[in-house]
Image (cartoon, grey):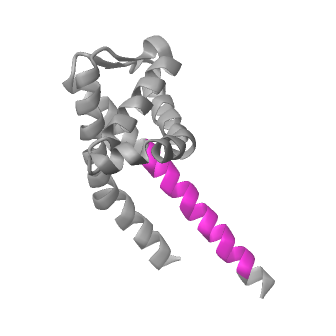
């Protein structure tokens, strides 16, 4: 019985790691595509896109650590605006990533950052629904 529980936890861990790697790959691709669309949004794609991957990892970490705290702090404003303030948190996370990566990730216009945050959110939902969730379901079904 104990071996069966360990193999289930190992499979679950493998699925979570695979999902995270797939998230990073897909969102890096989305980031690079968005950076080609806007001139005031620059991400250094030299060194085989390592800074795009790094930006996605930083954003992922900030979304798991700082964003919930900010969401709780801004909950009254978000409630009063019926959720319209929430993209401002995404812009803050993008600007914080801009500050961390310095010259390798630049958002020069706050309105473009706002538009990019909304566009990235839409693209993330699409990538999640079209690519990631079906692959994870297939992995869980097969094994």
**Residue 83's x, y, as percent?**
29, 49
Drawn side of residue 51 relative to residue 3, left or right? left
Q: Residue furthest bottom?
A: 1
Drawn side of residue 120 relative to residue 37, left or right? right
Give the residue displayed 44% in from the left and 16% down from the top.
104
Drawn side of residue 106 relative to residue 142, left or right? left
Secondary structure predominantly adopted by residues drawn in magenta = helix
Give the residue displayed 21% in from the left and 22% down from the top.
38
**Residue 36's x, y, as percent?**
24, 24
Q: Foreground residue, 11 or 91?
A: 91
Up the image or down, 79 lies above or below 114; here it is below
- Location of residue 42 (image quadrant): top left
- Location of residue 6 (image quadrant): bottom right
Q: Quadrant of the N terminus?
A: bottom right
Residue 46 in magenta stretch: no
Drawn side of residue 78 relative to residue 63, left or right? left
Q: Residue furthest right?
A: 2
Q: Foreground residue, 109 or 82?
A: 82
**Residue 103's x, y, as percent?**
44, 11
Give the residue displayed 56% in from the left and 60% down from the top.
16
What range of the chain is rendered magenta?
5-24
Asked if one can make out residue 26 in the rendered structure from this viewpoint, the answer is: no
Up the image or down, 89 lies above or below 10; here it is above
Asked if one can make out residue 65 in the rendered structure from this viewpoint, the answer is: yes
**Residue 136's x, y, as percent?**
44, 66
Q: Residue furthest top?
A: 103
């Amino acid at each position: 019985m104990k071996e069966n529980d360990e193999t289930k936890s190992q499979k679950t861990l493998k699925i979570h790691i695979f999902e995270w790697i797939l998230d990073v790959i897909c969102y890096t691709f989305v980031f690079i595509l968005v950076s080609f669309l806007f001139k005031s949004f620059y991400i250094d794609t030299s060194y085989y896109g390592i800074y795009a991957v790094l930006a996605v990892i930083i954003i992922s970490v900030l979304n798991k650590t700082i964003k919930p705290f900010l969401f709780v702090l801004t909950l009254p404003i978000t409630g009063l605006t019926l959720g319209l303030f929430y993209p401002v948190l995404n812009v803050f996370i993008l600007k914080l990533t801009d500050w961390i990566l310095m010259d390798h990730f630049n958002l020069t216009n706050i309105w473009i950052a706002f538009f990019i945050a909304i566009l990235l959110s839409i693209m993330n939902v699409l990538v999640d629904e079209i690519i990631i969730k079906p692959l994870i379901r297939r992995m869980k079904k097969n094994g």
